[in-house]
Image (cartoon, rainbow, N blue to C red):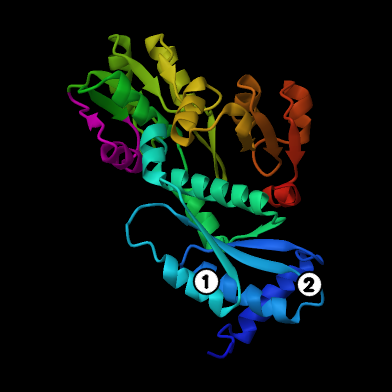
Amino acid sequence: MSRTPFVPAELLSKLWRAVIEFDMLQAGDRILIGLSGGKDSMFLTAALAEIQKYAPVPFELACYTVDAMFSPAFPKAELEAFCGYYGLKHYSEKVDVNSAWQNKGNTPCFTCAYFRRAATNRTALELGFNKVALAHHHDDAVETFLMNVLTSGQAAGRYCLRTFPGQKAFLLGNGLLRAELERMGLAIDNERPDYVLIGYDTTLNYEKMTKVCDLVRAGLPYVATHPDFNCPTETGFAPDIGAIIAFIEASAGRRPDMILGKPYAGIVEEALALTGLEKHELAMVGDRLYTDIATGLNFGILSILVLTGEAGEADIAATGIRPDLVFERLSAMNPYL
């Protein structure tokens, strides 16, 4: 079989430019490629094998695959043949991701990614590879982010399901929040509720505010998703839940029994439960001092302020809330990741 490359020259040149621009290759590098068997990692393997043939500096390549044990039909022979086509050694290892997910209680996608990365990095160290190459592109990064988002609404839903099993909520919130909570299995009945749950509501009116104040005044358990006073919009700011909490307190004389969102403990506890991580493994990145940064400081989490939202450098001095790190924008963090 000839080793005619199937990597299009246009794509190969883009990879070459990235390698040169970010100084990714040095003489003597030993690079372990994370090969899942999908098209992205197979392309990366083929492309790096082609670059290896013409690179001005010598470097070694090998591939590693995690058998997550989701199926007995793990294509080990096919992956070894693919690697052999490029003269690359192939390593593989079984990792029972499903059992790990059930034991730790995280989201399945987070657990799978976490254990795959951990196994790949460990194997690279054990075998003497100094670099790991992953075919994780921009679309993957966005998808991973969205799949692992934990909103204060979701945290409130998880809390209410545990705290009020079988009971019904009066929900002050928009249709998106209601749909999210109902997907989680939360029962909502605004006529005969057992407790009150308030969230961001762009359909707020005086009738709703009167009803929720009556229920809070009557002593029903009272939960809020987060305490932010303002929500940034294209034209400025819109009143957020913190303003609604203040309205209810002025009328009914009560604050929420539980607020889940930053800077309170609820959102941190839910994040730790979902990820299985410890606080020292987390970083809190945000643009608000009194919620985002206060959360990090309150719970011993690295706090990083980005100056692209509500807070500026002058606010740090004015409030006394001092983040561990400050960046002009998110992209400025890239060299440190």
Q: Secondary structure at mark 2?
A: loop
> In the image, is residue 81 part of the stretch drawn in magenta?
no
Which disc, if any, is residue 238?
Answer: none
Q: Which residue is mark 1?
A: 42
Q: Give 93 or 39, whichever is nearer the viewer.
A: 93
Image coordinates of residue 183 in percent, x first then y, are 27, 41
Q: Give 155 or 207, whichever is nearer the viewer.
A: 155
Q: Secondary structure at mark 1?
A: helix
Q: Which residue is mark 2?
A: 58
Specify which label sits upstream in the sequence, 2 or 1: 1
Q: CA distance from mark 2 to mark 1?
A: 22 Å
Image coordinates of residue 39 in percent, x first then y, are 48, 71
Image coordinates of residue 9 in percent, x first then y, are 63, 86
> In the image, is residue 182 part of the stretch drawn in magenta?
yes
Q: Is residue 62 left or right of residue 148?
A: right
Can residue 165 be seen in this snapshot?
yes
Q: Amino acid at mark 2?
A: Pro
Q: Which residues are magenta?
A: 172-191
Q: Amino acid at mark 1?
A: Met
Which residue appears farthest toward the left when viewing the image?
192
Q: Which quarter of the picture shows residue 23? A: bottom right
